């Protein structure tokens, strides 16, 4: 692929200081820990993992909403730290989980969809209404809803409004954070299919954060699996779903069988609950829950190994087998090498 990736995170970390408990002791929460990730133009990269694993924090860093404590992020080859907020917003827009709380109930649909044009001081106000209505039609909303209010719309229609608002400025990338989890199951597939159609029609790139692994398999071209702030496996979607390498990925994919869709990933059948992110286990942080853990796993943190099919996995089980091929190939894969 030519040129720089649309978005590239290099060894980014994000730490927060939290206080609580006895004496309000201050502690450090490492929400994201030395993560490297490239998102190429036109692809759908999915981030999966249990709640609290750092997915949303990583996404917020890519939108410029949180500054990395360490590492760097580039958009189109330019450091995100050198771009002002408006420039970032023109390139990257979010679609949030809950269309009920993300839309101001006192604003009309037209006002909501044209809002990014106002905020960006678009130079052609005479076209705002037409462009907003065209975008509404593109996402399947009749123009007559322009003067109505969110409370008059169904959940699916509200999410279409949120999508129209995200796209009216024609961003290149959309970060979709659980875009369907607040919707009825019957509406979820309509929204996912709409997002696929829009991606093809507008040439969009998506970062999809989802507990819905069926949606991930349906939409994503690559998947990064996060655990306690690190990416433990990254692979093409088909490869990950056919033969997950990391024991945590294997446990996640078993959770697809969970009969209750609202349970999502947390029912991972791992026995031991998700560790306290303020008290990350040493060595491989997954070792207390891993059925394949070896004595060494509690001592040494696994480095990421690049596998011949383009996947990367951070697990001692794979480090030896593929050690000879674990050096990243030249050029663009260099940044993918990371710990854990
Ligand atoms: Fe399990 Fe060890 Fe691999 Fe961690 S490094 S996932 S504990 S086998």
Image (tube, grey):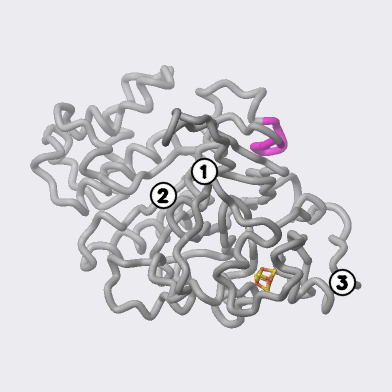
Quick one: SS at disc 3? helix
Q: Is residue 17 above or below residue 289?
A: above
Q: Is mark 1 within 8 Å of ligand 1?
A: no
- Report the front residue among 144 and 162: 162
Quick one: SS at disc 2? strand
Quick one: SS at disc 1? helix
Give yes or no for contact between labels 2 and 3 (Cβ–Cβ under 8 Å).
no
User: Of callouts 2 and 1, which one flags the residue occurring earlier in the amino acid sequence?
Assistant: 1
Residue at the spot of label 1: 59
Give yes or no for contact between labels 2 and 1 (Cβ–Cβ under 8 Å).
yes
The residue carrying pointer 1 sits among few (fewer than 14), some (14 to 19) or many (20 or more) residues within 10 Å by Cα, namely many
Quadrant where the N terminus lies?
bottom right
Q: Taken as a whole, is the magenta stretch helix, strand or loop?
A: strand
Q: Residue at x 50, y 60 (%)?
A: 48
Q: Is residue 119 above or below residue 185?
A: above
Note whether residue 176 is visible: yes
- Report the front residue among 89 and 202: 89
Residue at the spot of label 2: 177
User: Of callouts 2 and 3, which one flags the residue occurring earlier in the amino acid sequence?
Assistant: 2
- Residue 145 place in picture, x, y as percent: 14, 40
Seen from this angle, which residue lies furthest right? 324
Magenta-drawn segment? 71-79
């Amino acid at each position: 692929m030519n040129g720089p990736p649309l978005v590239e995170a290099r060894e980014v970390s994000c730490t927060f200081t939290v206080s609580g408990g006895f004496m309000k002791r201050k502690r450090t929460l490492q929400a994201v820990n030395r993560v490297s990730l490239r998102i190429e133009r036109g692809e759908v990269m999915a981030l999966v993992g249990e709640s609290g694993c750092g997915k949303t924090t990583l996404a917020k860093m890519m939108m410029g909403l949180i500054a990395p404590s360490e590492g760097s992020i580039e958009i189109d080859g330019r450091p995100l730290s050198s771009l002002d907020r408006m420039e970032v917003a023109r390139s990257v827009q979010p679609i949030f989980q809950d269309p009920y709380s993300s839309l101001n109930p006192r604003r009309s649909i037209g006002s909501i969809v044209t809002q990014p044009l106002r905020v960006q001081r678009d130079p052609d106000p005479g076209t705002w209404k037409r462009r907003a209505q065209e975008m509404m039609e593109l996402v399947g909303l009749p123009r007559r809803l322009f003067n109505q209010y969110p409370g008059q719309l169904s959940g699916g229609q509200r999410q279409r409004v949120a999508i129209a608002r995200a796209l009216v400025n024609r961003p290149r990338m959309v970060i979709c954070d659980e875009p369907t989890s607040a919707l009825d199951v019957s509406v979820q597939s309509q929204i996912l299919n709409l997002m696929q159609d829009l991606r093809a029609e507008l040439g969009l790139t998506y970062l999809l954060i989802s507990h819905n692994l069926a949606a991930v398999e349906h939409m994503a071209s690559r998947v990064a699996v996060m655990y306690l702030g690190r990416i433990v496996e990254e692979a093409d979607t088909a490869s990950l779903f056919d033969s997950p390498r990391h024991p945590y990925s294997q446990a996640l994919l078993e959770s697809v069988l969970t009969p209750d869709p609202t349970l999502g990933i947390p029912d991972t059948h791992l026995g031991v609950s998700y560790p306290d992110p303020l008290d990350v286990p040493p060595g491989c942080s997954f070792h207390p829950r891993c059925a394949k853990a070896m004595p060494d796993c509690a001592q040494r943190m696994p480095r990421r190994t690049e596998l011949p099919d383009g996947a990367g996995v951070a697990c001692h089980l794979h480090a030896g087998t593929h050690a000879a091929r674990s050096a990243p190939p030249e050029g663009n894969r260099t940044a993918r090498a990371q710990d854990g």
